[in-house]
């Protein structure tokens, strides 16, 4: 009888150990998940697939991945889950930012662009200064025109992920709008907007007009 009890206790111990290891493996797999387009980037730096968001109750959403570097899969770009609002790019349509190149054919330098804009007076450059000092320090910036085109190329996946977040966390997201300011300057009177229409059209618009601003974040 005692021998049978010991066998059962040993079996139970093995089963319990196996369950604990399985849970640890599952937790580790979630913590080390490689980022994919459409994944939800959490405040703790981990990534959650959208269809698993409902059960990831200990996680807080920060952004949605819209670009992953094919050569370095741990690097990429993620967009904020909410707009900052509508702002003028500049309050003066006859002012040129000397630190920014104009008429750029390919511009992926959103962080550098935003830095140059934030070096200018906040009252003159509302869009770039719409990002709080804390968020700027945390890495958020106004995307360049080509970074926004990457975002719109993944429109359906980003919108789907935002839907999963909103379903579980009501009021924390805003829809992905059809027109955003980029941080790319064209010249004295205009900067680039990017729209969801016509395969992510990018074109100049007068700086004093108010368009939506939505920051992005590079992860490494």
Image (cartoon, rainbow, N blue to C red):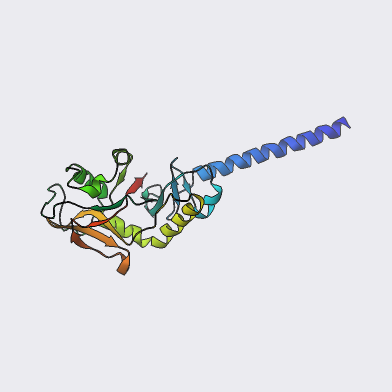
* Quarter-of-image position of residue 162: bottom left
**Residue lying furthest right:** 1
Residue 3 placed where, x, y %? Answer: 85, 32
Residue drawn at 30 percent across, 69 percent down: 198
Q: Is residue 43 left or right of residue 181?
A: right
Residue 4, percent across and down? 85, 35
Above/below status of 203 relative to 67: below
Task: Name the side, left or right, on which 36 lies relative to 132.
Answer: right
* Location of residue 47 with respect to 163 vertically, above or below: above
Q: Does 153 sit left or right of 186 as displayed?
A: right
Q: Nearer the viewer, residue 190 or 28?
A: 190
- Residue 23 appears in which quarter of the rendering? top right
Which quadrant, please, contains the C terminus?
A: top left
**Which quadrant of the figure contains the N terminus?**
top right
Q: Give the residue at the far top of this rendering.
A: 2
Image point (66%, 41%), residue name: 19
* Above or below for 157 versus 75: below
Q: Residue furthest left?
A: 94
| Residue in view at x 58 percent, y 44 percent | 26
Q: How many marks?
A: 0
Tell me: 121 left or right of 28: left
Q: 25 or 42, which is in the foreground?
A: 42
Give x and y (percent) for residue 213: 29, 53
Percent of width and height locating residue 152 = 34, 61
Choose between 12 and 59: the one closer to the eye.
59
């Amino acid at each position: 009888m005692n021998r049978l009890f010991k066998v059962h206790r040993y079996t139970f111990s093995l089963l319990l150990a196996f369950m604990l290891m399985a849970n640890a493996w599952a937790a580790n797999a979630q913590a080390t998940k490689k980022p994919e387009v459409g994944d939800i980037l959490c405040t703790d730096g981990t990534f959650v697939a959208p269809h698993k968001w409902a059960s990831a109750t200990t996680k807080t959403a920060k952004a949605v991945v819209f670009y992953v570097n094919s050569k370095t899969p741990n690097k990429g770009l993620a967009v904020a889950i909410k707009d900052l609002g509508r702002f003028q790019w500049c309050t003066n349509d006859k002012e040129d930012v000397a630190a920014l190149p104009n008429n750029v054919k390919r511009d992926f330098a959103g962080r550098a662009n935003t830095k140059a804009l934030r070096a200018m007076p906040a009252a003159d450059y509302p869009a770039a200064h719409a990002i709080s000092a804390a968020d700027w320090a945390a890495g958020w910036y106004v995307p360049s025109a080509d970074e926004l085109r990457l975002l719109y190329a993944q429109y359906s996946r980003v919108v789907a992920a935002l839907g999963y977040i909103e379903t579980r966390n009501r009021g924390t997201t805003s829809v992905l709008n059809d027109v955003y300011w980029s941080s790319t300057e064209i010249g004295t009177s205009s900067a680039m907007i990017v729209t969801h229409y016509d395969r992510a059209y990018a074109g100049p618009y007068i700086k004093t007009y108010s368009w939506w601003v939505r920051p992005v974040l590079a992860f490494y």
